[in-house]
Amino acid sequence: MLVYVDGQRRQCKIDGKIKVSDLIVRLGFTRETVIAKVNGKVVTEYDYAEPSDRVDLIRVSTGG
């Protein structure tokens, strides 16, 4: 599975499909801190990613 965090490739070995929320946690993030895209489409944490997919995680930043 190709996984990118803020455009930088991360190593992630996944056997079979995985729920996006589980992938987010496995990479050390929480669903509140990232937006997930699978093959260019924004998805929810309830969607799944396959080993052949490209997953992009974009960190959300807030400020005041």
Image: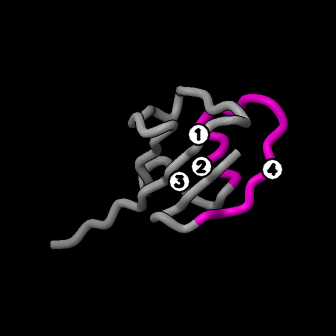
| Alpha-carbon span between mark 2 and mark 4 | 13 Å
First-in-chain label (3 vs 1): 1
Give the number of callouts: 4
| Alpha-carbon span between mark 2 and mark 1 | 5 Å
Residue located farthest toward the left when viewing the structure as drawn? 64
Identify residue type, mark 2: Ile
Q: What residue did someone put label 2 on?
A: 24
Q: Please report the residue visible at 52 percent of the width from the left and 62 percent of the height from the top.
A: 5
Q: Nearer the viewer, mark 2 or mark 3?
A: 2
Location of residue 35 in the rendering, given as x and y in whole percent from the top left corner: 41, 48
- Label 1's element? helix
Q: What residue did someone put label 4 on?
A: 13
Location of residue 55 in the rendering, given as x and y in whole percent from the top left corner: 56, 45
Q: Please report the residue visible at 44 percent of the width from the left and 33 percent of the height from the top.
A: 43
Q: Residue 39, which numbered label? A: none
Identify residue type, mark 3: Thr
Part of the protein shown in magenta: 9-26
Identify residue type, mark 1: Ser
Kindly check if marks 2 and 1 are in contact, taking CB atoms under 8 A apart as contact: yes
Q: What residue did someone put label 3 on?
A: 30
Q: Nearer the viewer, mark 4 or mark 3?
A: 4
